[in-house]
Each structure stands twice: as structure tokens, then as C-alpha cells.
């Protein structure tokens, strides 16, 4: 089909990169934002703008809050309707577990409870209830206020919010797999890869500059892109290879029995009521054991299994912010007495590699400089993909114009929608967060509607204003959407000031960097968008001048 292996790799790189590049652009951009998802939450929910808190006392704060959680969430109940025989139950007397989770960046605390699902088709099925509380006093915080960072932008990074049949996970997984192919094929097709690491000619014509920047960002961040595509596939390997849902499913219960015998942790409820000893004392014992090993003693996750039953046990997991690998050093206690049942052993070699790759991807560690390097790596991926789109269009638009084809125009329209349209949608959502009434029913749903609505409008504008590409001219959609993104970003900063009083002078003076950092990032985005819009405008004028002179019949020699 092709004359040599290198041309085959070039074809593979071009078409796989084009088709799946739109998905990868979303994955990279929202993955970059997810590095600071908790900080975005603080900006979006002013009631949570206080200092990060450690795991609070279970006995005094968490247990009373858990006892008020008597029902699953309405949305989770609705999703479970098809999993029961007959109508849904009104009461849920059996509580399987309680859990509380926090990070070193969380002022608030996330709580969840799992309830046995009455009349379930699967006897082990359960349904969840969640709550967010102020860990200083245990008071619940409004859950109808969307956590834009951790509950919307972060899941968008790995699931595209396409939950049906886990479709989004599969699309992102395919894109990650093809990205590995594109990275390898890109290395093969670029024989002068080390020279390209230091080559960028911004004053050349658009096609040359775009290719230089594409090569530069692809080569410099190549290890980052490869590791994160690979680790993302590892994290969701259970979805892509659902072994327990196939012929091995009958062995699941037997495996639980063997695991219970090995670990001493009961797999099932005893069926008789039980009491719960002081969990605070269990936490203190876990911290003492961690300290004896020279480990930091912050608690990241608490879990009570088989709540109210004689077989209840408590698991205490370390936050593990002092290392990259995802680690918990879990210690498990008998619920009734506080006796230590099990201390998790060191992981096996295979589990250690899996934990390292997972921790490297999820970055639960306490290292701000490394977090910013993650952001730069993700944004370099965005630049690499965006310049790939531009190069594809610039290389083909004249040929398509002569042949009367519209392929280049449609690629440009989708590229505009994906690159600048994604910025517009994000900034519009932040503006909606600040202007929508705080007591609006379903406020979080409205914020999401603003996001998707703005993105659809950006797509329609992109389709409309990329028409000049069909005549081999530069589309004004790029510069116009850059101006729109800049205006929206500045508006979000001003609206945050107007609605909360937290302007930059105050947040910087108080050292509250989650909000100050968000405002500074928005202003930096606006500045970059303005610079891009001005450069695009000059490029468009520079490209239009020779075409205008040619249309007037000016000879080439005279133009020279």
C-alpha cells in the first residue's frame, strides 16, 4: 500500500490523530483542569472557602452525621429502578457501610453510605447516598451546588459524561490506546526528532509554524503523554476487561469466602445486632503504628463495613500524601472491641507497579510544583493536538478548494469547536455559576446546561465562520472565538468579585490561593486569548493581501 514503513506510520499518525484528536483534546484539557479540581470547587462554592481540614473526629462529628443519612440519593434511587423486582422500597433499613474521604486540599468532607437494595434482582446489589459536610462542626453543606471541578470537569476528563453502557469510558480508552500508537508512529516518521526539539519558526507561514510547534510539544512532552495514556488504561482496566462479569462471575462468592478466611475480615453480615467501639481510639492506634514506621499519619479514608451488625469492622487508610504511589497502609479493626484484625501487608511487585502508575496519574501527593508540571504537560498535549489540526487544514485547504471539496472546512469547524469552543463553554459555565440564583432548584443542572449550550453555540458559530476555508482562506472563527473566550474569562473574574467580594487584592493578601489562583488563571487565559486573536488577525490580513493583488491581475514580478 505504501512505499516504505515510514510512510505507513505517517498515514497512521495523521488519520488516527485526526479522528481521535477531538476526544484527546477534551481529555488533555479537562485532565489539566482536574489537577486543581478541589480549588475550582472552592471558587464555584463560596460557602466552602476556608482552610483545608483534616479528617474530623468520628465519634463526635462523623457518626452523628452518618445516623441522619437514612436514604439513598434520589438520582441513585431512580437509576436503581430497573434493578429491582416490582416497585422501589420506601425504606432502607440495612446500611451496608459508611465511608468518609478527604484530601490535603479539601476544606469540606465527602461522606457516603451504602444501603442494601430491597427486592433487588442481584442479592448483593446496593444503592448509595452521599453528603458533603463542614468538618469543623458536622453541618451539611448544600449538595445541589455543583462541585464544578471534582463532579463535572474531572469526570468529563475520563468519561465524557456518556454513562450509558460506560460508553464514554470506552471512547476515552480507545483514544488513549490510539494515542500510544500515534506517539510511536510519530517517533518513527520524524527521523530528525532531536533537532525538532529545538526548532520553532514562528515567523514562517502558518503551515510551517504549526508543524514546528506540533513537533516541539510532541517531542518535549513525549514521556509525559506516553505514561499518562498508559496509566489511564491501567486505572480503568477493570472496565475494559470485566472478568468478574463473564464466566468467572460464579466464582465471586467463593473468592469472598477465601478472602475472609485469609484476612479475617467478615465478608457477610452475621445477622445479629452489634455495637461500635470508639473509632477515634482506632484511628489513634493506626496513627501510632504508621508513626512507628516513619510515615505521615494523616487519615484519608475511613470505612465502617456491616454497620450495626456483630460482624462490623472499621478500616482506617492513610492519606499517603508523602509519596507518589497510591498507598493506604490500611489497618482494620473489629467494630465491637477495637481489636486489630489485620494490617495490610506490603503490596506484591505487580500490585506495587499498579499502585505507582495509579498514584502517578491521580496525583494525590503533596507537591505543588509537580502539580504545575502536570498542568503544563497536559496543556502541551492540547497545543500538540491543536497545531496538528491547523497543519492538516493548512496543508489541504488549497487542494480541496480547487477540487470543490469541503473536507478541510469541516475539519477546521470541528477544530475550532474543540479548541476555542471548549474554552468558551468552560468560562460560560463559571459565569453561570456566579449569576444563577443560589436558591434555584436544580442549580447544578442549570450550570451544566450553560456549559453544553455554550459549546453548541460555539460549534454553530464555527460551522458558519469557517466558510472561507472552502475558498482556501483563513477562517475568522478562530480569532472571533478567542476574543469571546477572553471576554468571558475577564467577566468571570469580575463576577466573582461582585458576588462574593473576594477580589484578587483580598485573596492574595489573605493567602487564599484556591480562589486567587483561579482568578489569575482566568486572567492569564484572557491575555493569551487576546494575543492569539491579534496574531490570527495579522496572519489573516497577510494571507489576504497576495490573494487580493492576484485577483486584480497584478503580475507576480510587480508584487515581488
Image (spheres, rainbow, N blue to C red):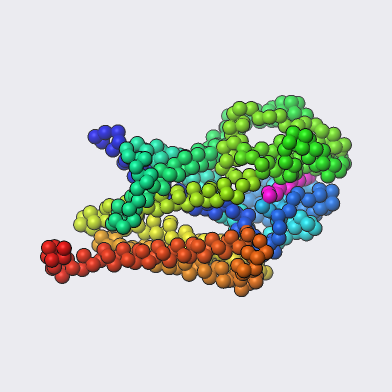
Q: Residue at x 52, y 51 (%)?
A: 375
Residue 5 drawn above or below residue 493: above
The C terminus: image quadrant: bottom left
Left or right: residue 213 versus residue 47 is: left
Give x and y (percent) for residue 496. 60, 69
The prevailing secondary structure element of the residues shown in magenta is: strand
Q: Nearer the viewer, residue 320 or 117?
A: 320
Q: Quadrant of residue 253?
A: top right
Task: Judge from the rendering whether residue 500 lies leftward or rightward of residue 170; answer left or right.
Answer: right
Residue 75, placed above or below residue 508: above
Does 266 lie within the magenta span?
no
Residue 254 position in % (x across, y down): 69, 27
Instruction: Determine whether, in the image, residue 246 is placed left or right of residue 197.
Output: right
Which of the pair 181/136 is nearer the observer? Answer: 136
Name the residue located 65 percent from the left edge and 71 percent from the top edge: 501
- Residue 44, given in percent of the width and then of the height, sits at 62, 62
Q: Is residue 264 above or below residue 544?
A: above
Q: Quadrant of the N terminus?
A: top left
Would residue 98 be counted in the magenta stretch?
A: yes
Q: Is residue 523 visible?
A: yes
Which stretch appears magenta?
94-104
Amino acid at each position: 500500500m505504501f512505499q516504505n514503513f515510514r510512510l505507513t506510520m505517517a498515514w497512521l499518525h495523521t488519520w488516527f490523530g485526526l479522528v481521535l484528536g477531538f476526544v484527546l483534546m477534551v481529555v488533555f484539557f479537562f485532565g489539566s483542569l482536574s489537577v486543581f479540581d478541589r480549588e475550582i470547587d472552592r471558587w464555584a462554592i463560596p460557602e466552602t472557602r476556608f482552610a483545608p481540614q483534616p479528617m474530623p473526629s468520628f465519634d463526635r462529628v462523623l457518626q452523628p452525621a452518618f445516623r441522619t443519612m437514612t436514604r439513598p440519593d434520589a438520582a441513585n434511587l431512580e437509576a436503581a429502578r430497573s434493578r429491582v423486582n416490582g416497585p422501589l422500597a420506601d425504606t432502607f433499613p440495612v446500611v451496608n457501610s459508611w465511608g468518609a474521604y478527604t484530601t490535603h486540599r479539601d476544606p469540606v468532607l465527602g461522606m457516603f453510605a451504602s444501603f442494601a437494595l430491597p427486592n433487588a434482582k442481584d442479592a448483593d446489589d446496593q444503592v448509595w447516598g452521599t453528603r458533603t459536610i463542614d468538618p469543623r462542626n458536622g453541618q451539611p453543606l448544600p449538595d445541589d451546588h455543583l462541585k464544578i471541578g471534582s463532579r463535572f470537569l474531572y469526570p468529563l476528563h475520563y468519561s465524557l459524561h456518556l454513562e450509558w453502557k460506560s460508553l464514554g469510558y470506552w471512547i476515552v480508552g480507545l483514544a488513549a490506546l490510539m494515542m500510544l500508537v500515534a506517539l510511536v508512529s510519530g517517533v518513527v516518521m520524524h527521523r530528525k526528532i532531536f533537532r525538532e526539539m529545538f526548532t520553532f519558526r514562528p515567523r514562517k507561514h502558518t503551515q510551517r509554524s504549526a508543524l514546528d510547534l506540533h513537533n516541539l510539544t510532541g517531542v518535549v512532552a513525549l514521556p509525559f503523554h506516553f505514561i499518562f495514556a498508559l496509566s489511564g488504561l491501567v486505572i480503568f482496566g477493570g472496565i475494559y476487561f470485566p472478568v468478574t462479569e463473564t464466566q468467572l462471575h460464579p466464582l465471586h462468592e467463593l473468592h469472598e469466602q477465601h478472602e475472609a478466611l485469609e484476612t479475617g475480615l467478615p465478608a457477610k453480615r452475621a445477622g445479629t445486632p452489634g455495637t461500635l467501639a470508639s473509632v477515634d481510639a482506632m484511628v489513634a492506634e493506626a496513627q501510632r503504628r504508621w508513626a512507628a514506621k516513619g510515615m505521615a499519619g494523616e487519615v484519608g479514608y475511613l470505612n465502617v463495613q456491616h454497620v450495626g451488625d456483630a460482624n462490623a469492622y472499621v478500616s482506617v487508610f492513610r492519606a499517603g500524601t508523602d509519596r507518589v504511589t497510591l498507598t493506604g497502609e490500611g489497618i482494620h479493626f473489629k467494630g465491637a472491641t477495637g481489636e486489630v484484625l489485620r494490617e495490610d501487608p506490603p503490596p506484591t511487585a505487580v500490585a506495587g507497579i499498579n499502585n505507582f502508575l495509579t498514584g502517578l496519574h491521580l496525583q494525590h501527593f503533596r507537591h505543588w510544583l509537580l502539580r504545575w508540571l502536570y498542568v503544563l504537560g497536559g496543556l502541551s498535549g492540547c497545543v500538540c493536538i491543536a497545531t496538528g489540526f491547523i497543519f492538516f487544514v493548512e496543508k489541504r485547504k488549497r487542494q480541496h478548494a480547487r477540487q470543490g471539496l469541503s473536507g478541510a472546512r469541516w475539519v477546521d469547524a470541528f477544530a475550532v469547536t474543540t479548541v476555542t469552543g471548549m474554552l468558551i463553554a468552560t468560562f460560560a459555565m463559571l459565569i453561570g455559576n456566579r449569576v444563577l440564583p443560589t436558591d434555584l432548584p436544580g442549580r447544578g443542572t442549570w450550570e451544566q446546561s450553560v456549559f453544553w449550550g455554550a459549546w453548541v453555540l460555539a460549534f454553530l458559530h464555527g460551522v458558519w465562520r469557517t466558510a472561507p476555508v472552502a475558498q482556501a482562506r483563513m477562517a475568522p472563527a478562530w480569532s472571533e472565538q478567542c476574543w469571546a473566550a477572553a471576554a468571558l474569562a475577564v467577566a468571570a473574574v469580575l463576577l466573582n468579585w461582585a458576588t462574593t467580594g473576594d477580589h484578587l487584592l483580598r485573596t492574595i493578601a489573605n493567602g487564599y490561593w484556591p480562589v486567587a489562583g483561579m482568578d489569575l488563571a482566568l486572567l492569564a487565559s484572557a491575555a493569551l486569548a487576546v494575543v492569539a486573536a491579534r496574531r490570527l488577525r495579522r496572519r489573516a490580513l497577510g494571507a489576504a493581501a497576495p490573494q487580493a493583488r492576484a485577483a486584480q491581475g497584478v503580475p507576480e514580478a510587480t508584487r515581488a
